[in-house]
Image (spheres, helix red, strand yellow):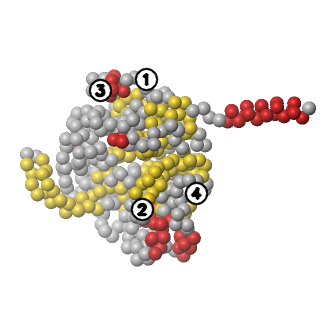
Amino acid sequence: MQMKRIFPLLAIVLLLASCHKPSVKIVPITKYDEEAWLSEEKLEKIPMLPARVDNTLRNICPAHRISDGDTIPPLAGEVTLLPLASTPDFNIGMIEEIYTDDDLLFILGAETEGDEVFVPEIKEQAGFIFRKNGKLVAQLKPMDVDKDKTPIVMAVNRQAKEVCLMYCGENYSDGELLSYDYEGNLLRHEVVFFKDGSIMGFTQNHLISNFGRAFSFAPQLMVRDPEGMPHGYILTRRTKSYTTGRRVSEASLSNCGDELFYTTEHSDTIWQVGPEGAVARYLVSGDSVGVDSLLLDNNISTSSYQWGLATENRFVPEIGDYPLLISPDFLLCRYIKPYNVKINEEKEGKIVSWSHECQYPFLVYDRKTGKSYWTWGRTSKWTLQGLCLSGAQALTTDGTLISSQTPAQLKYYLAHPEEAEFDNKTQAFIKKLDIKANPVLLLMPLKHF
């Protein structure tokens, strides 16, 4: 009799286990021939979405001049130190990207090698989900991804409650997009339609990414609908170009709830982008650039311009390791301000050579009060507030700034009191850290000013 009871119970247990196991779908984004869709002749088959400048554009560049004496304004609250739990078989030597949603943290981390504390060499990358108390929820493990491919970018689809990792091979080709639920279960493994997707973000369940640099005629952004098909392209009209280089410009996509904002290092404008197109929201201009001078020829090749308009009162976004960060209450971005500009020679309207020095201030804009401020990450010595501001990687919807420091970095500062100044509580915390532990998050609430 007992054996007869065991078999039905076993069947029920196996049935329940199978219900909890997520199904993995290997779904290519498009059925169309890739080369046909990416050719110049076929590009017109995908609609161009509008990018416009209207009366909502606001110049948020602070009116007062910056100086070496500027410090952190009275907007920074007390910093909380949050050590991340260990990750089995993977030591996070540095954090490359941080995203948040409700009580979860989504982190793209890198295992490192070598003894360099501040510029380590990346060995391997992986995605992780943590709770805001530092507890590990899941490691996002790839499935059937070529070993030579690495996850170069992460994005969170807050509407669908999914987190995505994009993998690319050499020369940023043959991309693969892996989508997970918030428990870390793999949902989809897709062959990505676009190439060279060094940035991506979600809004209204649409994926937005930059386009490949191999096509200089192509618009800057591509929009993919929830079914994975091309929805349209967005060309955010370039404003005045302040830098040059024959390479893809650094760019940033930043979420504020389900809103998505975009800027590049070659622009003084911050755009809000979505499935309907783009609208210029913020202008960061120290030379009173008007709306009429914002619009340039949309057909200018992105690789043809030169260094230009080199004056001492211009502010250029320094994206790279310093992303644009926006919450309902604040906007934060690091900028480059050239000074001591010396133009050596000019021929046929092109600047042949020039030299300059730079300042690297942070723009903090209070979206509620309309006030803005240029500030610096450090004064005479590093503080926790300065470290959090200078290394800011995420800004939560409630206005909390998030940065990260490895135990090795914190112990370095502790051993060099001439460079950093911590209170006794922080010093005791750092002393107890295992130097091989995962990074520590610095969480700092911002205050209205």
Query: In the depicted view, which residue is nearer to us: 238 or 432?
Result: 432
Residue beneath disc 3:
39
**Regarding mark 2 in the picture, which secondary structure is present there?**
loop
Vertical comparison of 340 with 394: above or below: below
- Neighbour class for label 1 at 10 Å: few (<14), some, many (≥20)? few
Q: Nearer the viewer, residue 130 or 16?
A: 16
Q: Which mark is residue 114?
A: 2
Identified by mark 2, the residue type is Gly
Check if mark 3's residue and mark 2's residue have beta carbons within 8 Å: no
Depth check, mark 2 against mark 4: the one in front is 2
Residue 409 position, x and y percent, is: 45, 66
Q: Is residue 178 left or right of residue 54?
A: right
- Of mark 4 and mark 1, the one earlier in the sequence is 1
Q: Residues within 10 Å of mark 2 (few under 14, many from 20)?
A: few
Under mark 1, the amino acid is Lys
Q: Are marks 1 and 2 in contact (CB under 8 Å)?
A: no
Residue 199 appearing in the image: yes
Which disc, if any, is residue 31?
Answer: 1
Front label number (3 vs 2): 2
Tell me which numbered mark, 1 or 3, is placed earlier along the sequence. 1
Measure how far apart labels 1 and 2 are at the Cα level: 44 Å
Q: Secondary structure at mark 1?
A: loop
Of badges 1 and 2, nearer the viewer stands 2
Q: Residue 242 at what x, y percent from top left?
A: 23, 50
Q: Quadrant of residue 230?
A: top left
